[in-house]
């Protein structure tokens, strides 16, 4: 999926995000122990259980960064964003990653909401007419809205 890159500024660092590579479910992790690190305390060590966590999605994006003053280029292979695997979670994450496209996405959501309402109205009419409606009547109703 080819998308134009977007630029974000964080202080002196400019991060240029590329395209979304993959979207996949996260893994269920299990704590297997802990490591004591001076100044940080105990840090847990985690291993994968091999099972898929269907409650979260991971979005992998390509990214390159650049520091303004020295024009030093830092190449990073990918950036991972973790979000909940719900409509609201994915919606909020995509709008945060692609702020320039938020208006377009809002318009698409409004159109989908309108189509859902039209579908409900047609189904209610079908229910009132004795549970049977011909295809001809459905297309006529869909065209009239």
Image (cartoon, rainbow, N blue to C red):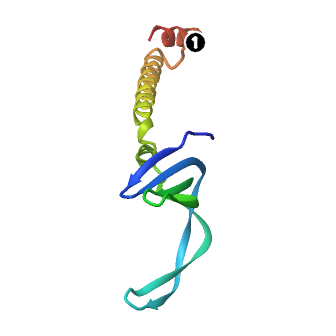
Looking at the rendering, which quadrant does residue 136 occupy? top right
Work out whether 114 lies above or below 56.
above
Give above or below for 20 relative to 113. below
**Rendered residue at 44%/36% (across/down):** 101
Left or right: 14 in relation to 139 = left
Q: How many marks?
A: 1
Q: In the image as oriented, which residue stretches furthest toward the front? A: 70
Q: Tell me if 3 is positioned left or right of 84 in this view.
A: right
Residue 32 in the image: x percent, y percent? Answer: 54, 84
From this viewpoint, is residue 59 visible? no
Q: Image point 41% across, 37% down: which residue?
A: 102
Q: Which residue is mark 1?
A: 134
Nearer to us in this view, 131 or 8: 8
Q: Residues within 10 Å of mark 1 (few under 14, many from 20)?
A: few
Residue 68, percent from left and from top: 43, 56
User: Closer to the camera, 136 or 64?
Assistant: 64
Q: Is residue 131 visible?
A: yes
Where in the figure is residue 83, as x and y percent of width and height? 46, 55
Task: Kindly state the secondary structure of the residue where label 1 is placed.
Answer: loop
Spot occupied by residue 126 in the image (x, y as percentages of width and height): 48, 18
Image-quadrant location for residue 10: bottom left
């Amino acid at each position: 999926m080819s998308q134009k890159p977007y630029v974000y500024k964080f202080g002196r660092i400019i991060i240029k995000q590329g395209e979304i590579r993959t979207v996949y479910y996260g893994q269920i992790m299990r704590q297997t122990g802990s490591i004591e690190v001076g100044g940080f305390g105990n840090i847990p060590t985690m291993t994968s259980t091999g099972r898929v966590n269907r409650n979260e999605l991971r979005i992998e994006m390509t990214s390159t960064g650049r520091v303004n003053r020295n024009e030093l280029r830092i190449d990073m292979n990918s950036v991972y964003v973790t979000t909940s695997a719900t409509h609201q979670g994915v919606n909020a994450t995509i709008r945060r990653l692609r702020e320039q496209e938020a208006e377009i996405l809002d318009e698409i959501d409004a159109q989908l909401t309108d189509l859902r309402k039209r579908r409900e109205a047609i189904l209610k009419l079908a229910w009132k007419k004795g549970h049977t409606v011909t295809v001809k009547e459905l297309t006529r109703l869909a065209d009239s809205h």
